Structures are given as C-alpha cells and as structure tokens.
Image: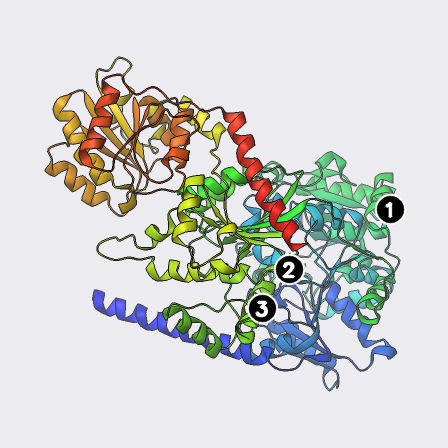
Amino acid sequence: MTSRPLVRLRSSVKGAVRSLGRAARSERLAFLRSRPLRPHVVFYESFAGNGVLCNPEAIFRGLLADPDLAHLEHVWAIADPAARNAFVAEFVGHPRVRCVERLSDDYWRELSTAGTVVNNATFPAQFGKREGQVYLNTWHGTPLKHMGFDMPDGAADSANTLRNLLMADYLLAANPFMAETMYEDAYRLRNVYRGTLIETGYPRIDHQFHGDGSDVRARLAAAGVAVGSLPVVLFAPTWRGSTFAAPDDDLDHLGEQVAAMQEAVGPDAIVLLKTHQVVHAAAVGHPRLRDVLVPNTIPTNALLGAAAALVTDYSSIFFDYLASRRPIVFFTPDADEYARDRGTYFAPDELPGPVTGAAGEAGAHVRRLLADGPSERVSAWSARFTPWDDGHATQRVIDVVFRGGADGTRRVRRDDRTRILLHAGGMRSNGITTSLVNLLRALDPERYDVTLLLQMQRTPAAVMNRARVPATVRQVFRIGGMNGSKALQARRRLSNVRGRVHAPRHSRSQDRLWRDEWDRIFGSAEFDWVADFSGYGHFWPSLLLRSPDAPRAIWLHNEMASDRLRTIDGRAPMKRSLGLVFEQYGSFDRLVSVSPSLTRLNREELSEYAPPDRFVTVRNVPDMERVALGAQEPPESVLDEDEPAPAWLTSLAAPRRDERWFVTVARLSPEKNQARLVRAFAGVHERDARARLLIVGGGPLRRALQAQIDAAGLGDVAFLAGERRNPFALMAAADCFVMSSAYEGQPMVLLEAAVCGLPIVSTAFASVGDALPGDTIRVVAQDDDALRDGMLAYLAGEVPASALDIPAYMAEVTAEFDAVVAESLAERR
C-alpha cells in the first residue's frame, strides 16, 4: 500500500511538471508573438482540427485556385491522423500548402505569426489575436438548437466561443436569421462587437452546386462504402449532450436506426450515416457502422450535393440542404427531452418536412417523398435560409476578406444605450455578490447595456449566483492565462511583492502586457463606462485600467483602511493586496462607497491615493422581492434535503412559543465580531431566561464561536445555524435583529431586516446612520455592556419595528448610480 507522504510527493511532482509545462508554453507563445506577422500566410482550423472541412475548406480551395492570390501560403491545423494523411497525400510537394498537428509547437508558431486565421469554431483559450492579424470566423451552420446564452448555463459553456467571436474581424452569416438570432442575440454581440458581418452566402454550400456526385461516389467506394448508382439517403444526426466535451451517442443504437431506415426505404436507395465531428472517431471503429459510415475526409456539403434526401434531427446541416430543395425528414426520438435540456428555435410543426420519433417511419417518409417530391414549405424555407447561395459564395467572401470588398457586409446593430462593464469578483455567496446582483436587477435595461466580467468558477455557489443575474446581462468570462514573457510576468509579480503596481502609461512593456490581456478577453468589444464592483483583488483594477477610452470606477464596500488591517489568526491577509489596490485608486475617475458616511470616511483615510472630488456614493440595493418571498417561507424551508430539524429550529418555528429570539446573519469573520455578541447575549440571558440567540452564516470563526458558546454554558440557548440558502425565513420567524460589527460598508442585512419588519439593535460603526432611512435602529456603543443593554431594551418594548419604503428607496439609489455614470461620462467628453 502506498504511503500518504509518497502520494503527496507524487502529486507535488506532477503538479510541478504541469506548472513547468505551462510556463514553457507561455514563454514559447510570448516569443512567437514577438515575431513579425507573415501577411502572406493563411492559417486554417476546422472543428478543432478534425479535418479539412466546412467553410474553411471551401475558402482554402477557392484561394488556392485564384491566380490573383497565388502569393498566399496555406497552413492547415489537423488533429485527426487519417485526415492529416489524406491531406498530405493530396498536396504532397505543393510549394504553398502544408499542415501542422493541432496544439503542437508548429501549430502555435503558425497560428501566432499568420497574417490571416480562419476557423469555423474556436481557437484555444491561450490564443489572442495580434494587432494587424486578420481573423475570419465562419462558424459551422445556421442553428436549429439553442446556442450561446439561450442554452442552460450557456454563458459559461459559451465562454470561449464568445471570446473568439469578439476577437474576429469578420463573422460569416449564412442568412439573416443566423446573423440576428445567433450572433447578435444568442451570443450578445449586439452593441459591443465592432467587426464586420459578411452576409453573402455560405462557402461550403457551393459544393452542392458543382459536380454530378460522381466524385463523391468514387471516394465512398475507395473508403469501402459501396453505393453504386443508387440514390443516397444521408442520415446525419447531431450530437447529444450540452457541451462538445461529453457526447453520449449510443453507437449500437445508431446502427439499429440506420438498419430500420434502410428496411423502410427499400432496395431502390441506400442509407448512409454521417456522424457529428465530435463522435466520428468513436464511430469509425464500430463494426456495425463500417459499411454505412461516411468518411470524415469527404466534405459534408459535397455529400449533400450528391444526396437525394436527408434525414436529420437538430443538426444545422438541414439548413444547407435547403439550397437543393430536395426532401428532408426529421427523426427526433428524444424531442421532449432535447427541448427540455437544450431547446430549439423552431417547433416541430414549423419544420420543412415530416417529423417522427420512429426510425422505420422516417424511412417510410423518405420513400414517399422520393416518389412525390418535397413540399412547398421546403421552397419557402430555402428562400428564407439560403437566400444568397448560388454556388459563388466562396468568391464573394474572398473578395471581402482578401481584396477589401464591401458587398454583402454590415456592422452589428447598435442602439443608444450606455454600454457598461462591471467586474463581478468570484460570485461567492457574500454581501458583495448580493449587492451586485441586486444592482443588476435594478438597472434599467432600456438605458444600459450591461456586461459582467467573471472568473470561471464552477462551484455550486458561483453557479447559483450566476443564475440570479438578469438574462439581459452579457456574461464574459476570463479563461486561460496572460500571454507575455516570463521576464515581464516576473517583473510584474516582483513589483507586486514590493507593494507597487505599474500604473497605466508608466511602463510601455507592462501596458502592452495588460492591453494584450484585455484584447484576449474582449477582442473588439467596446464599452462606454467600466467599473470594478468587487474592489478587492489588485489584478482586476490593473486590467480594467487598460480598457480603451472609457471612464473607470471602483467600488469601496467598506471602511477600506480598516479592512486592509483586518486580522485572522494573527495575520492580515489583505494588507498587501489591498495596498496594491490603493495604489491604483488615483487612476480611477470615481471611487464609489456604499453610504454617505463611508464616503466621508474613505475620502479622509485614503486622501493620499486620490483627490477628494472622486469619492462618491451609490448605496446598495436589496433584492426586495427575494427577501419578501423568502420571509413568507416557513423556517423549515432552510433545511437541506433529508436534513433532520435541529431542536432550535423546532423551538423557533413553534406557533405559541415563550422564547424571545435574537437573530443575526453575517459571515463569521473578525469584522462582524460575533464573539462580542455572544458575550453580550450571556448577560441578556442571565437577566431574562426567555432570550435565545441564532447566528446564521458560515466562515473561518465558526469553530472558535462554538467553543465560546460551549465554554459560556450557552449551548442550549445560543446556536450556530450555518450558511443557509434562505436566511430570510429565519429572520422573519425571529423577534429582533442584532448586529455586532466593528465596521461595515452599507450592511445589506439591515435593509433586509427592515423588509422583514424586525426591530433592530446595532453597534455604532461609521455607516450605521445611513444604513436605513429613518432612525428606528437602536444604535449602541461598541462594547459588550452597551450591546447587552440594547438587547434588553428590545425585551422591555423600547425598540420599535423597522420598515422600508421600497419604491422610494430604489428610486433614490438608481438615481445615485445614474448620476455617477453620467457625470464621469460628461467629464470625458
């Protein structure tokens, strides 16, 4: 049996090897990006290197045959060995054509220095388009199934796709539906993308207009798929699953479906299977599919040109086939499941062909349509979705990208909304995330086009909190790491260790490093106003300060000078990091505190970092609806599935209880000072045995607080509830809210307590006077006895319930935000 130290050693060695590998790749990329671009080189990739396929293949052959562009060299990235061998065999000895293995050193060299890059999907996260490099993204078809932000958790799943689209100089759209529904809406390019849409037909569809199919039949025969002179029925199902990383096609079942279709079609036609690129490698080795599987080396649209009919499900392939105006049958055995898990843009009864869930019935429909011909709906759909396809789309695209033509091009639509970018932080379940989500919900989508910059976190809390972001907000994720040499990165980190950051325009090399990172994340995206809402990490201000020509703001959620010195277990974990943030304050147009008192305090304590007129106020916004709905839930609703009800919950929820419950909701951390609350409560309970205390929240001090409660003999009357999904049910069931913090920003929880109609007792911190309109909060000094006496005052009936005029408060806060944006924009004009 392997010892634990040895396992840890092996893990450490593997981690070190991976780290060295990443560092070597980063250094190699940095070196390559410093090399001159080669304008005469065109680099192609299709379906992550699965072959010489799709629109890039059509453009490549069009360029190769164009005598006016004979100076161009062509490089293909191919991962599939069979496709690479076929390519080499076709172009052996050609002086202007070569291929590289995807993700190899040669791949990165060619991709980093090519003058033009072409892809029908996405380049890896490490890729960032260089200045002067031209990027054409053709995509790979008009979508029937939901795409981008229209998918469940689509923002995260589409992170690299959106990044690539924003980087592209040209985006190819096969039809207006693809341009508007997919690019502009599903991928949220409207308003921010500054590249060019090309709407002039789909190059790959040109294959369907050329030749009589004899070449395709010969290539099929060479691959062992004999069709003779029989009409070909192409069965082309899409892939299953929500991401390319996990296709789950049942290949045995696929073979059964092909056999059932063939039997129903009869002997006068032959059914062939065209698998999706993602599952083709697995299908190649399956014995049942060997005689019917179309090789991946034959362009799909050449197959479509040779096919007499098409059977598909949710694949975009049928949109291409519409150009032929031949029969289409939709075989959708899992229509209900697919609509629920992924969704489609068109209902089954809208599609241009029969829809069935039985393979044999699909074959029967094909047999009938081959005899009778397609319906009028096929012609109508063809006019709508292949309006420009006439066999010459490739040349028109080449004219735009390589000759500077403008026919068939346009910009993405824009409106007059203010485009704002907010950095969100880690989207952990804390006050900053709550404040951000509530602000996003409060902003007028008719006035603001909002983009949220996020870190790629897959934790349950981050996923849950992202799901609360309004659907109108564009979510952009930072994935991958910074490009740039180790020397530049080391210089940046060494400066940080010494407590310094490179301010914009103070170091040309560092500015270039950060600007490259901005471009890698956002491409051509353009924003009018940029803000770091998180306000704590020093990396993000450095990035946002390199945003092109926009006012910038940063949020100050607390008394920042005190926060910087906050200690946990004798350590001040934020001392250096917040010091680096402070160093950047002077480069921001606005420093936004979350209460008037906090603004005055931060203006005074941080005066060495920024002029006083830059400190402004935007108060926090509570999610009134969520609080109100949560407060209506019974206390038992806070329990996890199968979690037994603890005794304290049974007592709290009792309809005629004699106890008087104090409740607090906060992270268990030093600035919240729940230790003082426990000490004060001991004095309260000593004078009134009815008193109970419930502390809701999680954090690093939980164990210490439980030990304190036990040592004081309060284990039967004071309870740690932990972090709960719906704390408002517990708040509403309690009698009085109490806060013991040493300092705060504008504590959202006091607003939430007011919405729940609770009396409130709080220690005196700088912003408590601004926390709630009116003066219903019982504010006491920051010591144990004063807090005890405030709680006793509630028991004596001397602390009234708090309340909040929700519409009036919301109007005031949104007006504060509007003013900050408008004033900083006016200063830049």
Q: Secondary structure at mark 1?
A: helix
Q: How many marks?
A: 3
The answer to whether mark 1 and mark 2 are in CB contact below 8 A is no
Q: Which mark is residue 383?
A: 1
Instruction: Determine the secondary structure under disc 3.
Output: helix
Q: Can residue 230 be seen in this snapshot?
A: no
Question: Amino acid type of disc 1?
Answer: Ala
Query: Dot 2: within a 10 Å radius of its alpha carbon, few (fewer than 14), some, or many (20 or more) residues?
Result: few
Residue 516 is tagged as: 3
- In front: mark 3 or mark 1? 3
Given this view, does label 3 or label 2 mark the residue nearer the observer? 2
Q: Residue at x 49, y 28 (%)?
A: 625
Q: Is residue 736 above or below residue 299?
A: above
Q: Which numbered circle lies on residue 549?
A: 2
Q: Is residue 748 left or right of residue 27?
A: left
Q: Residues within 10 Å of mark 1 (few under 14, many from 20)?
A: some
Amino acid beneath label 2: Asp
Say which label, 3 or 1, has the lower sequence index. Answer: 1
Looking at the image, tell me whether mark 1 or mark 2 is earlier in sequence order: 1
- The image position of residue 361, as x and y in percent, is 71, 39
Mark with earlier residue (3, 2): 3
Q: CA distance from mark 3 to mark 1?
A: 43 Å
Please state the horizontal and vertical placement of residue 111, each as a whole percent of the image.
63, 74
Cα–Cα span, label 1 and label 2: 43 Å
Residue 802 falls in image quadrant: top left
